[in-house]
Amino acid sequence: MQYRRLGRSGLRVSTFSLGSWVTYHNQVDASAAVEMMAAAFAGGVNFFDNAEVYAGGKSEEVMGQALKTLGWPRLNYIVSTKFFWGLDRQGEAVNRKDTLNRKYLMQAIDGSLKRMGLEHIDLVYCHRPDPSTPIEETVRAMSDMITQGKAQYWGTSEWSAADIHAAWAVADRHHLHKPVMEQPQYHLFHRKRVEQEYARLYEDIGLGLTTWSPLASGLLTGKYRQGVPDGSRATLPNMASFRDSLTDAKKNAAVAELEPIAQELGASVAQLALAWVAKNPRVSSVITGASRLSQLESNLGALALLDKLTPEVMARIDAVTLPLSE
């Protein structure tokens, strides 16, 4: 495994990490989580990603149970969670959903700590921007989590470059803990935010990236070329909104064109796509997902491709995918 600094911080995260979105509780129970987290850890993975909203809090519980069973020294692994949507979706809970106000955030961190059975969470993210809450209020709450020892670093997920910079400027002006990382979607068909919109932030504020959906929710594995197969994550109720993009004819044709390139490198298309994301030096960690041990092992095999992605190979990949990227 390779390790990279998380932006300008001193924290080192594994180039490939393991996430729990969609899988934990829905497809992966506590015993399976133990098996896969143990295998990932043995392969050098030290970062495990989660979020309050995943499976309505059950994903954090599954990961917490797995961590307790595994019994690793706390210094040896990094866990994350994310806040925004809340768990109480009832109409009267107006301060517990779709918000980043102080009341919600300071209670949300306590809930995540309890579900995961931890004294602190290493990385906490604002899962989406909240235009209805003053950014200074959000920044102060996130900074206070760190000051109180409940978190180590904070960042954002799917925020605009302007909002990230504004949050950083507020923290800088008031001597608060600054946002360190952003978690954006990034894959061969979704590039512009990482490669263009955030371009100034890497040098200006030292932004690090922990990217999600490197396989475009499975599109880049090639398994959706003939439609949606039984048992795939696209059949899950909470993935309904992704089905049209997964069966996009032009993108699936492009995936087919990537197969000869992958074969020349002795890899699968999925491994090629994962390695492509990791090849970007601005990416601190590529968050992968798996519902089976074989998937996890295949994903980690992408590490061997990094040195094979020469400028010539990258140009060939771009020729196929860049015209279809957003």
Image: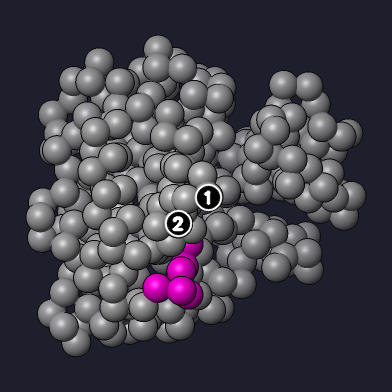
Q: Amino acid at mark 2?
A: Val
| Magenta: main secondary structure | loop
In the depicted view, which residue is nearer to us: 317 or 172? 172
Q: Which residues are magenta?
A: 128-133
Q: Which quadrant is home to the C terminus?
A: bottom right
Residue 92 position within the rendered picture, expressed as x and y whole percent measured from the top left: 47, 50
In the displayed structure image, the side of residue 82 where residue 218 appears, left or right? right
Residue 272 is situated, as x and y percent measured from the top left of the image, at 61, 45
Location of mark 2 (residue): 94
Q: Which residue is more in the foreground, 282 or 247?
A: 247
Let me know if residue 9 is in the magenta part: no
Left or right of residue 265: residue 123: left
x and y percentages locating residue 192 in the rendered image = 61, 72
Q: Is residue 4 left or right of residue 212?
A: left
Estimate the spatial distance between the alpha carbons at disc 2 and disc 1, rounded to whole Å: 6 Å
Residue at position x 35%, y 38% in the image: 48
**Residue at the extreme front of the image, as rendered:** 92
Q: Residue furthest top?
A: 31
Q: Residues within 10 Å of mark 2 (few under 14, many from 20)?
A: few
Please report contact status of discs 2 and 1: CB closer than 8 Å, yes or no: yes
The residue at 78%/50% (across/down) is 245
Q: Secondary structure at mark 2?
A: loop
Element marked by disc 1: loop
Q: Is residue 263 visible?
A: no
Q: Is residue 200 visible?
A: yes
What's the amino acid at mark 1? Gly
Quarter holding the N terminus?
A: top left
According to the picture, the residue beneath numbered tag 1 turns out to be 91
Quadrant location of residue 243? top right
Does 140 sit above or below residue 55?
below
